[in-house]
Amino acid sequence: MHPHVVREEPAARVARAVAKGGLHRAVKAAAEKVARAKAVGPVAHAQEAPQEPAAAVAASADHPRGPNHSRAMALIELRNVSKIYHLGGEEIRALDDVDLDIDAGEFISIIGPSGSGKSTLMHILGCLDSPSKGSIKLDGTEISTASMRDLARIRNRKIGFVFQFFNLLPKLNVLQNVELPMVYAGAGSRERRDRAMEALKLVEMEGRARHRPMQLSGGQQQRAAIARALVNDPKIVFADEPTGNLDSHTGETILNLFHELSRQGRTIALVTHDPEIAAVTPRKIEIRDGKIATNVDARLAGANQGPKFIVGSARNESRYEGGAE
Ligand code: ADP
Ligand code: MG
């Protein structure tokens, strides 16, 4: 039995919403225009997984989080973010006053037990949902007050999503599924086809372009979903339990694919309760009761996993207690 609480809507609706940049949860953000903040320069795609980004070294004395958090500009900046649900008179703090910076090029896992707030954090980082309090900057733009329409556009252009249940549209073939985000972005049919095929090649699925999702294995469906997530060349890809519905061997190949994409310079955040996955990513963010833990739990972080999964240098929120790195 899978301990993870699944609240996803029916696959087809989610798939459509994701591709379109639409919402699958009600967003109550005030309908304000996105403040177009200073544009950041294009992010260079490093050949190797980044170590300490140069930006992190440039100290800014007036940064509210002090020298340890000084960065020129993170790709995503969360400040004092809370998400509060009201359920039958009870107040649930799914996220409780969270500060977090994610830099371009990082490979991260968001870990924690079921119900700790991982998916909520991902939905807020991914502009699928708005916070109850606090501010979020994505790529220099304040988005906590963006309208649903603006959020949809930002998502479509800047964010890719991968889900546990793949969420491909069953009536479309693989190529059409991968083209979908570009349809909503307004690309022409020739460009769509070319870029979708390119994305399929990246995940070694070009030979399955005309297959329907039903005709594919779980691992192949997830590859197609990853191609769809990449096709608009997003700033960051979020994957929520991407191997949770795959057997362990297939899960490992999907994990290797994310690792490879990270090596190519892409920014990736994997949401997982699985230590084997957490072990792969250089940075691990642990959520406990809606807060970011200051000490990452060594077991959750996969500190004791075999060396075949350990990659890169450890750049964690904190040191493992067991000193296993
Ligand atoms: P995780 O992904 O770590 O399992 P979630 O982010 O899904 O955790 O949930 C965090 C907490 O918020 C849980 O207590 C969950 O029950 C609650 N929660 C999440 N979504 C909703 C919602 N739409 N309405 C009410 N409570 C919610
Ligand atoms: Mg979850």
Image (cartoon, helix red, strand yellow):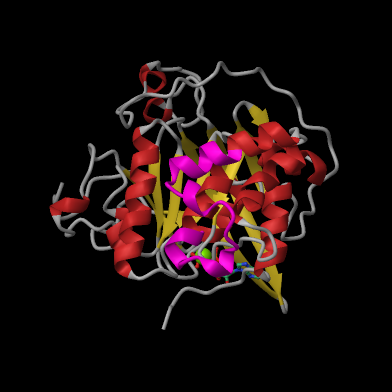
Quick one: 207 or 71, which is closer to the camera?
Answer: 207
Q: Is residue 288 visible?
A: yes
SS assignment for the magenta stretch, majority = helix
Query: Going by the picture, which residue comes out furthest to the bottom?
Result: 1
Q: Is residue 145 visible?
A: no
Left or right of residue 273, residue 161 in this image: right
Q: Quadrant of the N terminus?
A: bottom left
Quick one: 96 or 224, which is closer to the camera?
Answer: 224
Pinpoint residue 96: horizontal percent, then vertical percent: 55, 55
Up-down relation of residue 74 to residue 31 (above or below): above
Left or right of residue 197, residue 110 in this image: left
**Residue in the image at 56% along x and 16% along y:** 41
Left or right of residue 45, residue 155 in this image: right
* Residues drawn in magenta: 196-221
Pinpoint residue 186: horizontal percent, then vertical percent: 77, 35
**Residue in the image at 51% along x and 44% along y:** 200
Up-down relation of residue 233 to residue 89 (above or below): above
Left or right of residue 291, residue 86 in this image: right
Which picture quadrant has residue 182?
Answer: top right
